[in-house]
Image (tube, grey):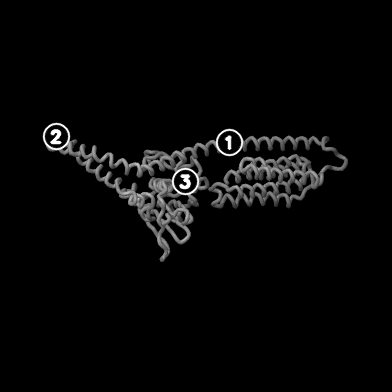
Amino acid sequence: MRTLIALRVACVVGELVMLGVVWKVLHWPFAPSTCLGLVAASAAMNLALSLSPAARREAKTWEIGAQLAFDLAQMTALVALTGGLANPFALLIIAPVTVSGRGLPMRDAISFCLLAIGAAFVLAYAAPAPWAPGAAAGDFLAYRTARLVAMIFAIVFTTGYAAWSSAETARRELALNITETVLAREQRLSALGALAAAAAHELGTPLATIAIVATELVREAPEGPMRDDAQLLVEQAKRCRDILKKLAETPERRDAVHERLSLLHFVREVIEPHAGHGEVRVEALVTGPPGVAAPDLWRRPEILHAISTFVENAFDFARSEILLTARFDVDYVAIEVRDDGPGFSPAIMARLGEPYVTSRPGAEGSRTGHVGMGLGFFIAKTLLERTGARVSFANGARGGAIVTARWPRSAVEASS
């Protein structure tokens, strides 16, 4: 969406240049109030979009089509009022067509191209010619100069857009590849639960042998480092037996634990790595209307990873407290991560969720030891949106950052 907004800024600047050339260089008659009103309408639409939450998310296909159709209609009307195809800046209508070829599916792009061709016919035959009586277009040095300016503007725009689009695509593809790698890793870790249950039976016998030998070493070894090491082996073998006992539970019980979990269990699992930290208190809360049962969720590694990323980010910036709140009703489930830190910087607020946007401190200034690359939020937001969530970022009224993911209840609730 931000790309569409930036491109419209370029078009508004081009339209103002066009009106200046028509007025000061070509001296053609036109209705200035109407033309400036059309430019103001485009600028006002851009300002409204820039201030709305929509500017921080991907544009849907129908939104791209609707905005480009508005731009084409606005430009066609403006050029028609200032000479039609005789206006050297009629080339401006190429701008939305160029964008449509990049942002719309092939069939929609072809339809938009035909619409632009129709607009060109309107400009060719419906707009009045602005020539002075008895003058020919070729006799106007000013016209040729204006034509040159318009051509340069069109060349710069199309070249700049192509380079910008190519660079943005390359950056996004790299970030999405990293996202796929993270998701694949999380899915492999989730699958390890089933593999571990089968491996537990095979590991039981050699582990028991290790425990017996280590116990004998403790009994026979003299006081000193060797006996301490043998005692450590006994303790670790006992710990391994406890872990294997849990992994070797029946499939029915394992499914109940590993494939689905309550909303309360979910938030507790997310905050567990940071619980008990002396510097920052991390708390979880589940709330919903009276009479509505809290849903059980499918254990989806992408959701766990994404919410854990938001909590980890809050952990680096919070002063003393992080609150993870899960809210539910009959239709929706929402999870909110709130901290009492400085909040999101205004410089990056509009770009949050895009790749390589970060204000995280370096490893030496980070509680988690992570260096900010600007991919964590992008990966988390992308993973959540693939599960059907709507992700929003905001600053609290009293400070601190707030990140919220909201799903239709049917998208995440584990069926009975």
Q: Residue at x 81, y 44 (%)?
A: 130
Query: Is residue 25 toward the left or the right of residue 275 in the image?
Result: right
- Tell me residue 133's x, y (percent): 87, 43
Query: Is residue 199 toward the left or the right of residue 390 in the image?
Result: left
Name the quarter where the C terminus is drawn: bottom left
Instruction: Give the camera-side residue of 30 and 167.
Output: 167
Name the residue that disc number 1 marks.
166
**Mark 2–mark 1 distance (CA, rounded to whole Å):** 66 Å
- Tell me residue 255's x, y (percent): 36, 50
Q: Which of marks 1 and 3 is nearer the N terminus?
A: 1
- Where disc 2 sits, the SS reads loop
Q: Which of marks 3 and 2 is in front?
A: 3
Quadrant location of residue 290? bottom left
- Where disc 3 sits, the SS reads helix
- Tell me residue 36's x, y (percent): 71, 50
Question: Taking 293 as reference, is 40 above or below it?
Answer: above
Q: What residue type is labelled 3?
A: Leu
Residue 320 visible, this orientation: no
Q: Earlier in the sequence, mark 3 or mark 2?
A: 2
Name the residue that disc number 3 marks.
383
Question: Taking 353 as reference, is 140 above or below it?
Answer: above
- Tell me residue 227's x, y (percent): 15, 36
**Mark 1–mark 3 distance (CA, rounded to whole Å):** 24 Å
Q: Which of marks 1 and 3 is in front?
A: 3
Q: Residue at x 49, y 42 (%)?
A: 357
Name the residue that disc number 2 marks.
224
Label 3 CA crowd tier, 10 Å (few <14, some 14–19, many 20+): many
Question: Taking 407 as reference, is 15 above or below it?
Answer: above
Q: Which residue is drawn at 48% across and 60% down?
A: 331
Label 1 CA crowd tier, 10 Å (few <14, some 14–19, many 20+): few
Q: Which amino acid does label 1 sit on?
A: Ser
